[in-house]
Amino acid sequence: MSQQELFVDSPPAGPGASEAGGGSRGRSRLGLVVTGMLGGSLVALYAVAAPFVAPALRKICLPFVPATTAQVENVLQALRVRSGSLVDIGSGDGRIVIAAAKHGFRASGFELNPWLVWYSRYKAWREGVHSSTSFHISDLWKVSFAQYSNVVIFGVPQMMDQLELKLARELPSSARVVACRFPFPTWLPEHTAGEGIDTVWVYNAKTFKSQLQQGLTRQTMTTAQEDT
């Protein structure tokens, strides 16, 4: 059979074939659009959510975990007879600072995550306590806490020994420190409140500063003895 006969005998493509091809291409374009929209939505969701779950204090990996209602109540209970300035180290979404301000404290929060700081400022404004609160974007290891008489910290075990030394050196003897979720490794608490993950430990600065001084004195005496 010649090529001419082959083309003559071949049936022409009808309207149905053309429509089928167009429908297939349409479905492909629709699939690409849906895939693009889904991908864009996931990227947008990650962009919004990632800053809220990223580490808040980068020297020690401390992800943002919101304080429970019981934890906030236990902190306020532990400081019920206190007043003056208060700082929340790693203040997250600002709930401790805002609650403390409502109970008469001049409250500040230090947080490395800027998204959380901006959100905290908005919450403080919405709750009507923006004039008695302040939130700062800062690494806790680069800040002095000497001006605060009340300190709240939601830490992790890996950072507590370093924070012991920092606070013992900087805080005034009249200060109180409230540790949430994890206690300090060597300090003796004045008392505790709550139970389980909501437990808080309350420390008297006069006591742990005395411990630090005694430790430094013993270290100096040991070094002197070794030198002789």
Image (cartoon, rainbow, N blue to C red):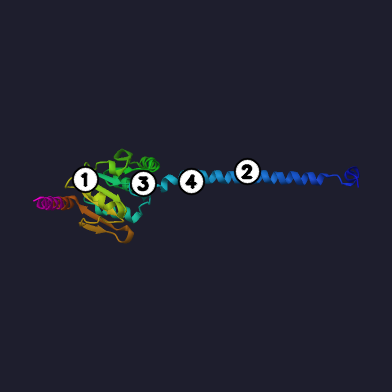
Label 4 sits on what residue type?
Tyr
Give me the C-alpha separation between circle 2 and circle 3: 37 Å
Q: Residues within 10 Å of mark 1 (few under 14, many from 20)?
A: many
Give me the C-alpha separation between circle 4 and circle 2: 20 Å
Label 1 sits on what residue type?
Ser
Q: Which quarter of the figure has residue 104?
A: top left
- Can see residue 82? no
**Helix, strand or loop: magenta stretch:** helix
Q: Which quarter of the figure has residue 4?
A: top right
Disc 3: which residue: 56
**Which secondary structure, mark 4?**
helix
Q: Is residue 137 left or right of residue 31?
A: left
Disc 1: which residue: 149
Q: Residues within 10 Å of mark 4 (few under 14, many from 20)?
A: few
**Residue extending furthest toward the top:** 131
Give me the C-alpha separation between circle 3 and circle 1: 23 Å
Q: Which of marks 3 and 4 is nearer the N terminus?
A: 4
Q: In this view, does 126 lie to the left or right of 161?
A: right
Disc 4: which residue: 46
Observer-nearest residue: 76 or 204?
A: 204
Q: Which residue is drawn at 75% across and 45% down?
A: 21
Disc 2: which residue: 33
Observer-nearest residue: 84 or 22?
A: 22
Give me the C-alpha separation between circle 1 and circle 4: 39 Å
Instruction: Specify the segment rendered in magenta.
Output: 215-228
**Which secondary structure, mark 1?**
loop
Observer-nearest residue: 98 or 222?
A: 222
